[in-house]
Amino acid sequence: MLLQGHATTTCKKGWIHSLESFGSVDGPGVRYVIFFAGCPMRCQFCHNPDTWTTDNAKEYTAEELIGQALKYKSYWGKKGGLTVSGGEPLVQIDFLIELFALAKEKGIHTTLDTSGNPFTTREPFYGKWKRLMELTDLVMLDIKHIDDEQHKILTGHTNQNILAMAKEMSDMGKPMWIRHVLVPQVNDRDEYLHRLSDFIGTLKSVERVEVLPYHTMGTYKWEQLGLEYPLKGIHPPEQNRIDNANRILCKGTYM
């Protein structure tokens, strides 16, 4: 898949938006977080639209990134490690495989934070994805909306391949954390939450479910990019709706 704004290269470099040395909400323990550039989805609530393309990204080799991460290994403890986020890391799956392979050689715990959007069972992606799963210790899967038609409105894409990826990971026993951004008037209806809960209940390897309240802190980025923010006027959810979502979604033995 080509990334907007740059030609492909053959030297296995990745387009990276930014790096975070001490991530505390991006997987277990303290994490070194690599934010990949490029994303095919256009989520209406995205707080990082500047990661959609590679226009402001920097090229790194896997060796350079692992070298940077290892500087902070003493802070990770037993649970920490490396997390890749985005953007959408699966867009650069070849580079991601190389990065995670090197991380495993160094004994680093690997976490993939993904929307699952690029997933397909078509080759060559499918074979590469299965190789990536061999190198991935934990997947944090962000399910934007359980209803396919509403998912298309919210993100511009179907959710069928995303749910299929979750089922495949469940079948292979891949540890998962499910994340769900709770957006008033969009996906916080009890009907949707119960449907999502029922789906999560079919997955055998979910360790944790996280409800992430929608916020508007990234709206200024839309303005800077000359984009009209599509959820203008929608406010963050009230605490009672957050509590309600947690009751519905976070009720399984995976907590």
Image (cartoon, rainbow, N blue to C red):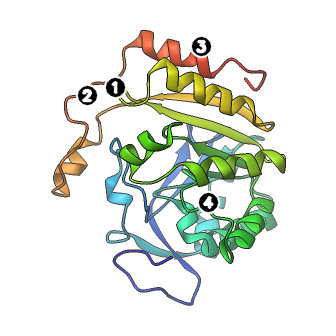
Instruction: Quadrant for residue 140, please give it.
Output: top right
Q: Mark 1 highlights which residue? A: 185
Q: Mark 4 highlights which residue? A: 69
Badge 2 or badge 3: first in the primary sequence: 2
Whether residue 8 can be seen here: yes
Badge 1 or badge 3: first in the primary sequence: 1
Q: CA distance from mark 2 to mark 4?
A: 38 Å
Q: Is 211 rendered above or below residue 167?
A: above
Q: Residues within 10 Å of mark 3 (few under 14, many from 20)?
A: few
Q: CA distance from mark 2 to mark 1?
A: 8 Å
The residue mark sitting in front, 2 or 4, is 2
Do tag 2 and tag 1 residues touch (Cβ < 8 Å)? yes
Residue 138 has which mark?
A: none
Taking depth in this image into account, of 148 and 35 the one nearest to the observer is 148
Does 172 sit left or right of 152 as displayed? Answer: right
Does 86 sit left or right of 219 as displayed? Answer: right
Instruction: Quadrant for residue 217, please give it.
Output: top left
Q: Mark 2 highlights which residue? A: 234
Q: CA distance from mark 1 to mark 3?
A: 19 Å
The residue mark sitting in front, 2 or 1, is 1
Badge 2 or badge 1: first in the primary sequence: 1
As shown in the figure, which amino acid type bears the numbered disc 2? Ile
Do tag 2 and tag 4 residues touch (Cβ < 8 Å)? no
| Point 75% across, 72% down: residue | 127
